[in-house]
Image (tube, rainbow, N blue to C red):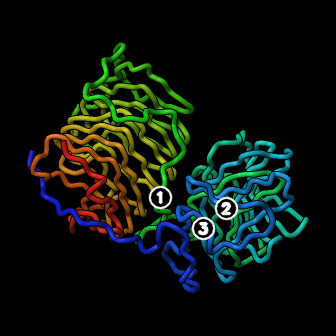
Amino acid sequence: MHKRRHPGRRPLVLAVGAGVTAAALTVGMTSAFAATIFTDTFNDGDASGWSKSGGTWAVDGSGVLNQSNAGSELARQFAGQTSWTNYSVQARVRPASFGSSSGLVGLAARSTSSTKMYRLALLGSGRAELQAVNGSSITAIGSASLGVATGTWYTLRIEASGSTIRGFVNGTQIASGSNSLASAGRIGLVTAYASGGFDDVVVDSSGGGTPTTPPATTAAPSTPPPTTSGPTTPPPSGWPTPTGSQKVDATIGVSGTFDGGLKRYYGIGDGGQSESQDPMFELAAGATLRNVIIGAPAGDGVHCNGNCTLINVWWEDVGEDAATFLGGTTYTVDGGGARSASDKVFQHNGPGTVYIRNFRVENAGKLYRACGNCSSSYQRHVVIDNVVVRDTDAVAGINTNWGDTARFSRITIVGDPDRETSICVKYKGVPKGSEPTKIGEGADGVNCFYTPSDITYQ
């Protein structure tokens, strides 16, 4: 297999930083295209740039901002500018305890004061509710019953565009409505008679809507998503032995969790790279596929129509693609492996972030490719950790003109003494019908993030 040599350069610091970036951009919030204007991962160990109102706040050793006083009537941290108008704010939120069914842990947007804001709240009753808060007057814009659990991370997102306010939990819209409470204001992290943790706060200047080219900006990840109860170490050098085999004549739809018990599933498609083959498994938003061996022919592998999790899934002979991520914002591949993919293993067509960890890839073109010519263009991100790579041209391919990012850690390249395997290949994304062009490769601290210590050769 022909491989390309890539330079190894030490990355620079990302412009938005690993810790808080106060919005140097206090204007331009009504730009037609999204731009990330604020981010805080709290990895710097403090909450500088935030203003506290009530509660007991501290950043713990894992880089999470916690509010620990469950008896506080209102505890808030505010950041950003009062002049911000149309924007989206997203954060990971983990309720720790609720003092009552009306206790809440949540995210705020367009806050004009400590008691006037739009708020997306996880409630002790188990519901998520998008609220317009004006002092003691609280108007519910919409809600959904989610069975909210303490100790669980949730990704909350508020999109404010004109008078339209939308709320999302784990990539699924739970509320949308028109409200004129506030046209501009800061972001906030809030609790009321509850305790909780907050991480990975990102603000971009999009107010939602259908992505176009140039694509809408999405949050570049800095930490892994919540654990998936999947493998925690690299897979063994050998591949699993199927516990049985099942021929599949039509796509298997999955909602909830499908556990295959390491049975081999085969029989869809022609076993080649021809386009538009049916998938073996089609996952609804929020679905999990685990302990499955996908044999040949496998068609177009797995389709994820929303957020999805693949745990210990093995592809013996990749056909068109192993998995395609179509909708949602967060997709996790934990454990498993894939081999014999003449093109790419994982195809990222939708928005958001793909997390690939504890995985093995052999004899492939690329492990991951952010679509460079789909009908809808998005900014896409991938985080690849603890992966073993053998006889593969490139680990990831991204489109730098759309702001894609790829982050790598604990990558082991096997059988490549000349170090010809490309880690991060950069392309110029193009409209559907054209072919993207390669424009470079290697770490740069802007789109491709890794250091020499992140890559091990065996």
Quadrant of the rendering where the C terminus is positioned:
top left
Q: Which residue is mark 1?
A: 221
Q: Which mark is first along the chain, 1 or 2?
A: 2
Residue flagged by tag 1: what amino acid is it? Pro
User: Does residue 430 show up?
Assistant: no
- Residue shown at the point (65%, 80%) measured from the top left: 81
**Dots 2, 3 in contact, CB < 8 A:** no
- Residue shown at the point (30%, 31%) measured from the top left: 315
Identify the secondary structure beneath mark 3. strand
Identify the secondary structure beneath mark 2. strand
- Quarter holding residue 64: bottom right
Q: Which residue is mark 2?
A: 166
Depth check: 383 or 287 in front? 383
Q: Find the distance from the CA under tag 2 to the CA under tag 3.
A: 9 Å
Residue flagged by tag 2: what amino acid is it? Arg
Left-right relation of 231 to 277: right
Quadrant of the rendering where the N terminus is positioned:
top left
Residue flagged by tag 3: what amino acid is it? Ser
Instruction: Give residue 133's position: percent from left, percent from top.
Output: 82, 66
